[in-house]
Image (spheres, rainbow, N blue to C red):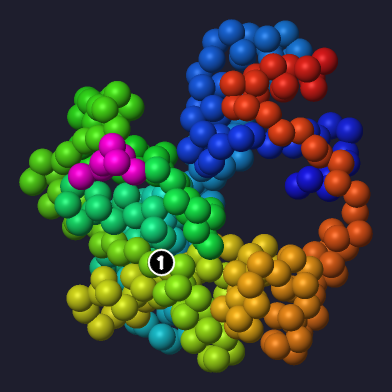
């Protein structure tokens, strides 16, 4: 992202974590004054992550595709149930699986895999969404270093209705906490099971998969923990590889070779050597490009930074 140099592109770094960025995005999407200023320039604000429901539509499709692929491979018979093992993240992939399940995809349950930021594990096991004593922990699966997964709200809406969802989300915003009733928890657990995977467990799964001939990233690795601990029936399981290994080369190099704090390029080279593969040319080329996007600001300055860029 920081090497992109198109004149119509602006990358803004902020001091903070994913939750800070997503909260800022939601504030901008809902800001009448900001959107009015954009309309003056004939611009409309949108989002490419799963805050935008259009993203969820695509995240729904590949659950169906992967099931049909198992049928084509004769790994399952049409109508036979499977488990879906999904890294938690912003809960978009899990939400897509949930909608596919409600549309008729034969799914036993969706297995939610978290890292040490395991608030969703607590929610699905106990009905408690409790952030009062939590702060984001930096892990080797950073796309899942999230405490407020925005698509959980859409699950609540579908299960419990608009009024109850509004009450729960308002309590979360004001008190950093809510508790589902016993009946609501039973409803949630009809669809979901959950567990979390710490960094060392993830590295071990990476090593095991590599020994079996598969090179995977640390987000995908968390699925293996949920696969082992959450299934109550011996059904086929679809595990979703939600990220690409080259983005997390220092973590993978550490798992495979033991090297610590390697530079991205050095880690890529050691992984490629161990796996007997070449670094993708598009990735290799990034290290020769100039860093052109250097903006780093506080989240309160995002609106002004965007307006200045548009001017």
Q: Nearer the viewer, residue 188 or 88?
A: 88
Relative height, residue 297 to residue 84 (above, below): above
Residue 80: % across, % down? 30, 76
Left or right: 94 with respect to 54?
left
Q: Nearer the viewer, residue 26 or 138?
A: 138
Left or right: 135 with respect to 307?
left
CA neighbours of label 1 inside 10 A, class few (<14), some (14 to 19), many (20+): some
Magenta-highlighted residues: 128-134
Residue 17: % across, % down? 53, 41
Q: Residue at x 74, y 66 (%)?
A: 263
Residue 119: % across, % down? 32, 49
Q: Residue at x 76, y 13 (%)?
A: 41
How many labels, in total? 1
Q: Nearer the viewer, residue 202 or 184?
A: 202
For disc 1, the marked residue is 198
- Residue 24 visible? The answer is yes
Relative height, residue 143 to residue 74 (above, below): above
Left or right: 283 with respect to 117?
right
- Residue 59 visible? The answer is no
Q: Residue furthest front?
A: 260
Q: Residue at x 63, y 72 (%)?
A: 260
Q: Secondary structure at mark 1?
A: loop
Q: Is residue 131 magenta?
A: yes
The quarter of the rendered structure image containing the C terminus is: top right
Q: Quadrant of residue 107?
A: bottom left
Q: Residue furthest left?
A: 182
Residue 230: % across, % down? 26, 71
Q: Residue at x 39, y 58 (%)?
A: 116
Q: Is residue 95 magenta?
A: no
Q: Quadrant of residue 170?
A: top left
Q: Nearer the viewer, residue 32 or 158?
A: 32
């Amino acid at each position: 992202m920081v090497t992109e140099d198109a004149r119509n592109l602006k990358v803004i770094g902020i001091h903070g974590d994913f939750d800070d960025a997503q909260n800022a995005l939601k504030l901008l999407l809902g800001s009448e004054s900001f959107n009015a200023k954009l309309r003056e320039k004939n611009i409309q604000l949108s989002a490419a992550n799963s805050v935008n429901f259009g993203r969820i539509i695509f995240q729904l499709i590949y659950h169906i595709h992967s099931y049909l692929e198992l049928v084509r491979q004769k790994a399952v018979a049409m109508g036979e149930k499977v488990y879906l093992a999904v890294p938690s993240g912003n809960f978009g992939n899990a939400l897509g699986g949930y909608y596919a399940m409600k549309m008729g995809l034969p799914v036993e349950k969706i297995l939610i895999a978290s890292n040490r930021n395991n608030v969703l594990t607590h929610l699905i096991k106990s009905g408690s969404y409790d952030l009062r004593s939590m702060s984001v922990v930096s892990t080797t699966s950073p796309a899942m270093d999230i405490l407020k997964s925005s698509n959980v709200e859409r699950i609540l809406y579908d299960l419990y209705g608009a009024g109850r969802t509004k009450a729960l989300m308002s309590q979360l915003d004001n008190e950093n906490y809510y508790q589902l009733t016993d009946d609501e928890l039973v409803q949630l657990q009809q669809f979901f099971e959950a567990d979390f995977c710490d960094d060392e467990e993830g590295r071990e799964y990476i090593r095991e998969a590599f020994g079996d001939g598969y090179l995977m990233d640390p987000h995908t690795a968390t699925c293996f923990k949920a696969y082992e601990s959450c299934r109550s029936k011996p059904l086929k399981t679809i595990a979703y590889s939600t990220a690409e290994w080259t983005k997390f080369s220092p973590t993978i190099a550490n798992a495979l070779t033991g090297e610590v704090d390697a530079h991205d390029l050095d880690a890529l080279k050691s992984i490629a050597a161990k796996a007997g593969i070449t670094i993708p040319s598009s990735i290799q080329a990034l290290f020769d490009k100039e860093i052109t996007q250097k903006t780093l600001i506080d989240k309160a300055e995002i609106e002004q930074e965007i307006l200045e860029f548009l001017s």
